[in-house]
Amino acid sequence: MHRRAFSELRSWTILDRRRGRRDAPVALSPAQARAAARLERERTVQFARGYIVYSILMVIGVLAMSLRNDLPQFGAIAGVAIVVLALAFVLSYLAPLLLAGIIVLLVNVSLPILLTLAFSKEASFDLLLLGVGLALFVLLFDESLYLKIGFMFLICGAFVVLQIVPVGHPEALGVDMARLEIASFACNMLTVATGMIAVLVLQLRFAATRRILEGVARFGELQAATDPLTGLVNRRPVYDQLERLAREGRASYAIAVLDLDNFKDVNDSFGHECGDAAISLVADVLADSFREEDIVSRWGGDEFVVVIPRVLTVEVPQVLERVRRQVAAAELACKGRGTSLTVSIGAAHGRPGRTPDDCFAAADHALYRAKQEGRDRVVLVDDYAPVEPDSKHADDAR
């Protein structure tokens, strides 16, 4: 993986750990969010096709019942319904799901109405409309809300009418009542199964949509807290960490401030493109030198800030000295020529009774001393009330 990309991903991991969000949603870029949305739509289409197959199996059951009870007229209706549903299944591959979904819904609404009018409400065929009402949100998930509302009124209206209008008697058709009771039981089970499956599919789809939205929001959050050039975090996470340290009263931490030496000369001699490459090189060294829980930040320009929680006093100079040596050993190629870089580093340790802001000020003062003492060095101070250097002299030192 490209080092800059690795640095960026590492910074995002730091943010998640810093905020205690180990279960934070995966950040999704706009392109990733669009791809995830397309995948979820395709899954919904697959669920819809499964419902069409499920509907065909139900109508086959009606056909078997009709033939067993010597009711050829209903057998013919069931046969036509099976053919129409099969065509809708094929159509789902050739055209948008909307057309196939409407056909399936119309068939699944019409068949319970016909069966209820022919037999009786005792067979519970009208209850199948409740399952169809839930299934329409699977078949038409991405379609207009008004279309869904229209089908809801159609299904609810049909169910209400069936409860009011007189219906036929199964005795007149010569249907055995024992078999009718079996059909009623089957209808009840199918209604419950259809409703539960539809709710499950909708829950999965809503959960996926929520993950996508949270992923996009997380991406925006991370982008706002990430420096675009280096992939390191910017000032915001550092301020958050300092506030957290102050709130928790921790003392076992350190703050380091780093600055490239003679950075203006690099820009003047080789151009700003080379200056950006120099900053990226230092950022890569920093990203590889600290733990995940450490906050490595590009503070601005050629300055970096590192907040190191839970660290021993003897460990800090060793780590910072290693960083200094690695930067000094690296060679930066600019316009066909190689040039070397050095950094000055100032650091301070946390102490009981001292605020993180005081520690930060001490580290910044240590950086000023490193510049004054000849650059390319690490200076640690424990003075938490540093004398503020004259701003003009401080700028000249850097």
Image (cartoon, grey):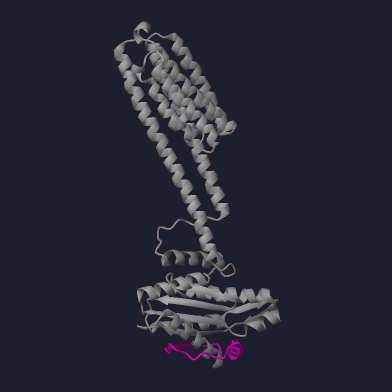
Q: Position of residue 274 (x, y in %)?
A: 66, 76
Q: Residue furthest bottom?
A: 373
Q: Position of residue 164 (x, y in %)?
A: 40, 17
Q: Determine whether, in the image, residue 180 is placed left or right of residue 110.
A: left
Residue at 50% in and 29% down:
151
Vertically, is 351 above or below 59? below
Q: Determine whether, in the image, residue 205 is placed left or right of residue 342.
A: left
Q: Position of residue 37 (x, y in %)?
A: 53, 46
Q: Quadrant of residue 159?
A: top left
Across the whole image, how many numbered discs are drawn on residues?
A: 0
Q: Quadrant of residue 281?
A: bottom right
Q: In the depicted view, which residue is nearer to us: 322 or 198?
A: 198
Q: Position of residue 290 (x, y in %)?
A: 45, 74
Report the quarter where the C terminus lies. Answer: bottom right
Q: Residue furthest left?
A: 178
Q: In the depicted view, which residue is nearer to us: 368 or 152?
A: 152
Q: Which residues are magenta?
A: 374-398
Q: Quadrant of residue 176?
A: top left
Q: In the depicted view, which residue is nearer to us: 137 or 77?
A: 137
| Magenta residue check for 270 | no
Report the quarter where the N terminus lies. Answer: bottom right
| Magenta residue check for 383 | yes
Q: Determine whether, in the image, residue 175 is placed left or right of residue 201.
A: left
Q: Determine whether, in the image, residue 372 is placed left or right of residue 294.
A: right
